[in-house]
């Protein structure tokens, strides 16, 4: 069977070939899916047991179910080898190229969904416990050898984090502690360099995706969107075109002689209007939905500072004053639930403007007497190649690191220990350490 890593992306004929193979491998039966209330659901032709939310399996999976599930997972894993799902898009991890294929995207979604059901089964849970005992889980993680998370269906659901409110709810942060988090985070993430850097990255990524799409499927909307983004970046460039750390209190006067006419003075309102226009223009272009949504998120902050000037020709002190106004207003008006504030935080922490995605959400549990807590989260891999494994480890570390940052900022009682879990078909179970945190790689094996 052909692997994604063997194919140069992106070509229309290759994509079609992969789609046909995906349909053949999976036995696509979405149209015949059963009602959600039924005892059994269907994962593309494979019956799997529905799970009672708070009491584990309502019906024990049979050995026949395990056999069919493992066979299906094996074939899908082979098809999707070296492909990862990042921010809702498929990526070839060998060269970091985009994989444009809706069938394969749906294949990946169902692969991970089936894997979640599989790892929730009693036999798999028991195997995971035994493997973690062998890997000295008890001594390195006080609190016993009981698997801390993932036995409830709610703990195996995927999660996309796009606001501080979602993080705080997950960690049971109180209303008073949320005020502390917001008061601490806002002044840091609304610094001028953070604000303009995040906005520039969002528009830059949108521009890159537009150019990529235009080369394949040119359209009036894409062409117009490209022009608007270019104009927006040009105006934004005025706000970041000098060094704010300069010791000079005044700008150097231009040399005498031929002097270019001064550029038209701008306000942040100009960028706001262009962002509104580009969102309206590209809203129906599904290939750009992620970038467009992220640009739309920034409208909230732009609206709050719309009256503040962006002008090269004002003195340095006046410019510093304008920048301080940006920070002051954003700090005051961006709320705890604001996606704009969350985007600034991820840029501040990681230099990224993407939402945080987790395959298996896990949870928080007390260790020992309750003076320490463990946060567990997981990721499902399509291969155990070292590059794929460490990519998954780093993604989990980043996600859990954000939760720990909020935990510590809120002043939660007790230390929070981070523990990541990864699952892959046919791999040897082992533990890894990254940045002082423990990660367990679990093999998904056939059960008889």
Image (cartoon, grey):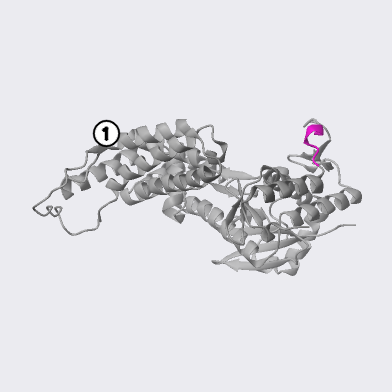
Q: Nearer the viewer, residue 165 or 351?
A: 351
Q: Is residue 305 above or below residue 391?
A: above
Residue 391: quarter of image: bottom right
Question: Which quarter of the figure is the N terminus placed in?
Answer: bottom right
The front one of 248 and 358 is: 248
Residue at coordinates 48% horizontally, 46% vertically from top-left? 211
Residue 184, horizontal then vertical, whole percent: 38, 48
Closer to the camera, 136 or 200? 200
- Give the residues drawn in magenta, as a range: 28-33
Q: Position of residue 103 (x, y in %)?
A: 70, 43
Q: Residues within 10 Å of mark 1 (few under 14, many from 20)?
A: some
Position above or below: 257 against 144: above
Asked whether residue 181 is in view, the answer is: no
The residue tagged with tag 1: helix, strand or loop? loop
Q: Is residue 212 visible?
A: yes
Horizontal side, residue 236 vs residue 163: left or right: left
Residue 30 included in the magenta stretch of the image: yes
Instruction: Identify residue for label 1.
Output: 307
């Amino acid at each position: 069977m052909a692997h994604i890593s063997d194919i140069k992306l992106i070509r229309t004929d290759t994509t079609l070939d992969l789609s046909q193979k995906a349909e053949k491998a999976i036995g696509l039966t979405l149209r015949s899916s059963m009602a959600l209330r039924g005892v059994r659901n269907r994962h593309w032709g494979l019956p799997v047991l529905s799970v009672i939310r708070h009491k584990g399996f309502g019906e024990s999976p049979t050995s026949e179910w395990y056999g069919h599930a493992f066979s299906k997972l094996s074939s899908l894993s082979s098809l999707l080898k070296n492909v990862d799902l990042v921010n809702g898009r498929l990526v070839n991890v060998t060269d970091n190229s985009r994989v444009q294929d809706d069938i394969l995207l749906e294949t990946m979604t169902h692969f991970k969904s089936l894997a979640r059901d599989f790892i929730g089964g009693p036999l798999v849970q028991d195997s995971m416990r035994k493997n973690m005992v062998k890997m000295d889980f008890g001594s390195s993680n006080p609190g016993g050898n009981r698997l801390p998370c993932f036995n409830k269906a709610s703990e195996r659901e995927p999660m996309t984090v796009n606001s501080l409110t979602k993080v705080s709810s997950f960690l049971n942060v109180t209303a008073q502690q949320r005020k502390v988090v917001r008061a601490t985070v806002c002044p840091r993430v609304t610094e001028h360099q953070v604000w303009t850097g995040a906005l520039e990255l969002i528009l830059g990524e949108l521009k890159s995706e537009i150019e990529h799409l235009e080369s394949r499927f040119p359209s009036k909307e894409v062409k117009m969107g490209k022009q608007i983004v270019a104009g927006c970046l040009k105006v934004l460039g005025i706000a970041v075109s000098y060094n704010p750390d300069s010791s000079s209190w005044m700008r150097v006067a231009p040399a005498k002689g031929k002097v270019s006419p001064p550029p038209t003075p701008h306000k942040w309102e100009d960028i706001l209007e262009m962002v509104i226009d580009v969102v309206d223009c590209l809203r129906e272009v599904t290939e750009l939905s992620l970038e467009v949504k992220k640009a739309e998120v920034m409208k909230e902050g732009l609206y709050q500072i719309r009256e503040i000037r962006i002008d090269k020709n004002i003195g340095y002190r006046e410019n510093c004053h304008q920048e301080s106004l940006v920070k002051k207003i954003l700090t005051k008006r961006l709320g705890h639930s604001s996606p704009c504030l969350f985007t600034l935080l991820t840029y501040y922490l990681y230099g990224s403007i993407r939402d945080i995605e987790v395959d298996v959400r896990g949870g928080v549990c007390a260790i020992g007497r309750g003076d320490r807590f463990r946060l567990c989260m997981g990721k499902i891999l399509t291969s155990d190649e070292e590059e794929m494994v460490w990519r998954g480890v780093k993604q989990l570390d980043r996600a859990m690191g954000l939760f720990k940052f909020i935990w510590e900022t809120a002043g939660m009682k007790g230390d929070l220990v981070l523990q990541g879990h990864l699952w892959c078909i046919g791999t040897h179970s082992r533990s890894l350490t990254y940045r002082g945190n423990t990660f367990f790689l679990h093999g998904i094996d056939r059960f008889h």
